[in-house]
Amino acid sequence: MFRGNSFHNLDTKGRLIIPTRFRDVLKQSSVNGLMVSKMDGAVFCYTFEEWRKIEERIRNLAVKGENMRRFRRIFIGGAFDCLPDKQGRIVIPPVLRQYAGLDREVVLTGVLDHFEIWSQEKWLKEDAKFQNDLKKEDMRNEVAALGL
């Protein structure tokens, strides 16, 4: 499982060093690589095994309405496979770097079944928004339902 946050820099070629703790998760997978796509202003990264599960769930959905067609078109159609090099770096495709505003400073955050790559600027805003939302009763109730 992917957990924790870390701050990194993209190099001039758009390469990112995957943290060791995330590489260890990837090595447990049958193929040492990632599927990456865009969502929520960030780049979402999945092991190939987890990506296959997502595709299978989408394929089996009874709902094939306009929203799901659009989701499939953008999220699945806009996905790329990324294989790490010998130094544990992946190249973030330019179209995804542009979408997420990834220039130099980025934040990787583990979200259990995947990790996300955010521009540092967007991540700090997302974190501040979360801290503010924690002050709201409905958010506190949702978190409390988890036993936290």
Image (spheres, rainbow, N blue to C red):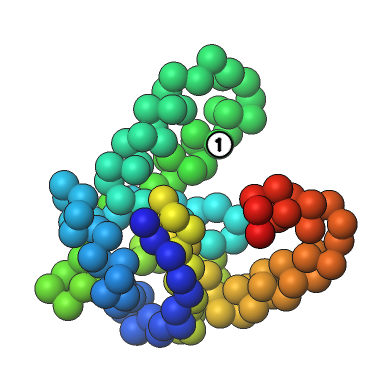
Query: Which quarter of the image is occupied by the C terminus?
Result: bottom right
Q: Crowding at label 1, few (<14), some or many (≥20) Cα neighbours within 10 Å?
A: some
Q: Position of residue 106 (x, y in %)?
A: 48, 78
Q: Residue furthest left?
A: 86
Instruction: Pick out the residue farthest to the right.
Output: 137
Q: Is residue 7 left or right of residue 128?
A: left
Rendering coords of residue 51 (x, y %): 35, 42
Residue located at (20% from left, 54% from top): 28
Q: In the shown orientation, is residue 85 left or right of residue 96?
A: left
> Can residue 97 be seen in the rendering of this structure?
no
For the image shown, how many numbered marks are present on the structure? 1
Residue plotted at (46% across, 71% down): 4
- Can residue 118 be seen in the rendering of this structure? yes
Within the image, what quadrant is residue 121 found in?
bottom right
Is residue 148 depicted above or below 132 in this figure?
above
Where does label 1 land, which residue?
A: 71
Q: Quadrant of residue 139?
A: bottom right
- The secondary element bearing badge 1 is classed as helix
At horizontal 44% and vertical 79% (from top left) the residue drawn is: 6
Q: Is residue 49 above or below residue 116?
A: above
Q: Amino acid at mark 1?
A: Phe
Residue 78 image offset from top left, x and y in percent = 43, 46
Q: Residue at x 67, y 73 (%)?
A: 127
